[in-house]
Amino acid sequence: MQQRKFGPTGRSVPVIGQGTWNMEGDDRAGALAALRRGIDLGMTHIDTAELYGSGKVESMIAPVIAEYRDRLFLVSKVMPSNASRAGTISACERSLKRLGTDRLDCYLLHWPGSHPLADTIAAFDRLAADGKILSWGLSNFDESGLKQALAIAGPGKIACNQVLYHLRERAIEHAVLPWCEANHVALVAYSPFGSGDFPDPSSPGGKVLGKIAATHRATNYQIALAFLTQRPAVFAIPKASRSTHAEDNAVAEAVTLSADEIAAISSAFPRGSRRGLPMI
Ligand code: NAP
């Protein structure tokens, strides 16, 4: 699995990782088997959040985290409603307890909220000084929010911005991705398959993907991941509850698209003119 430097952290992180949203509703044994299979194949970036199943997902994946802890890049997120100075620290400690670990590799503010960002960042700094988090980042931040965070934290502190990015939702390419690239912040694409609402193979866009996929002996999903992660600042965190899907995702980064293929996909799924940051 190809690895890339994750923003300013100095850590090498696989281009493709694994999401866990809604996992509490999945068949437990099957979902954990898929997670393990993905880790075995190099998808060691695991994304979770206190929000997911109101903590149930963090507890559910704890046995897998325990098995593989030192190999993982483990990410969780604080909900904006908890993101006061003291609240962020308590939320992180609850997440660590549920996950059965003493540290997170990266801790994110799930989306901008009403607590002052300076307080959340001060709490992140405290957690980092105490060794409870190794880096911190943001999620669902637009360009102006990112600028505000940079003004508070200074350069080299924001590890990543995790945002909605899939073939039919490319708004981040206008301003958010260029800002992240210019400021050495990793961009993590969430819901890279549109949360399961993936282009049908019989649709015009699906046919374009299918033709390219056939050339690479790949699936349409693998072509989508290759397209989304073509720029070196970008990582993706698809979620798979089936091991076969985890296996497919783990080898997607091996697909290298030609300039013509990238142009064909781009024109089948135009990025549009909307600059605002979309969110699930
Ligand atoms: P997603 O990854 O876009 O799509 C998941 C769907 O794709 C599932 O139905 C899955 O099926 C299917 N799938 C996965 N791999 C496949 C493959 N190789 N071939 C065919 N189908 C495949 O969904 P998501 O959960 O919305 O997003 C991924 C992660 O991003 C989340 O789990 C979460 O960790 C993160 N996220 C973050 C935010 C945020 O605000 N920061 C918001 C949303 C999501 P099976 O389950 O049957 O395998």
Image (cartoon, rainbow, N blue to C red):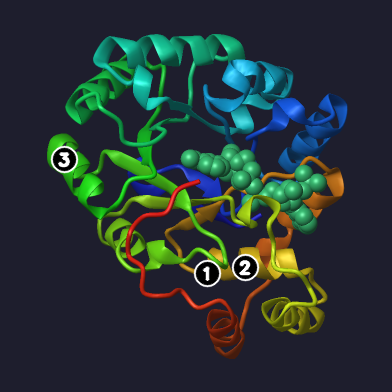
Tell me the distance, in whole angstroms, between the alpha carbons under discs 3 and 2: 32 Å
Q: Is 195 or 41 nearer to us in this picture?
A: 195
Task: Identify the amino acid type marked 1.
Answer: Gln
Q: Which residue is mark 3?
A: 154
Label 2's element? Answer: helix
In the figure, is residue 148 to the left or right of 129?
A: left
- Disc 2 under 8 Å from ligand 1? The reply is no
Q: Can the viewer see residue 18?
A: no
Residue tagged by mark 2? Answer: 226
The secondary element bearing badge 1 is classed as loop
Residue at the image position 45 percent from the left and 63 percent from the top: 232
Can you say which quadrant of the picture contains the N terminus? Answer: bottom right
> Dot 2: few (<14), some (14–19), or many (≥20) neighbours within 10 Å?
many
Work out whether 211 lies above or below 223. Answer: below
In x, y percent, where is residue 165? 50, 58
Do we see residue 43 in this rendering? Answer: yes
**Element carrying mark 3:** loop
In this orientation, which residue lies closer to the viewer: 224 or 259? 224
Mark 3 vs 2, N-terminal side: 3
Mark 3 lies within 8 Å of ligand 1 (Cβ measured): no
Q: Which residue is mark 1?
A: 230
The amino acid type found where label 2 is placed reads Ala
- Residue at coordinates 32% horizontally, 56% vertically from top-left? 180
Badge 3 local density, few (<14 within 10 Å), some, or many (20+)?
few
Which amino acid, by three-letter code, is at mark 3? Gly
Q: Quadrant of residue 55?
A: top right
Marks 2,1: beta carbons within 8 A:
yes
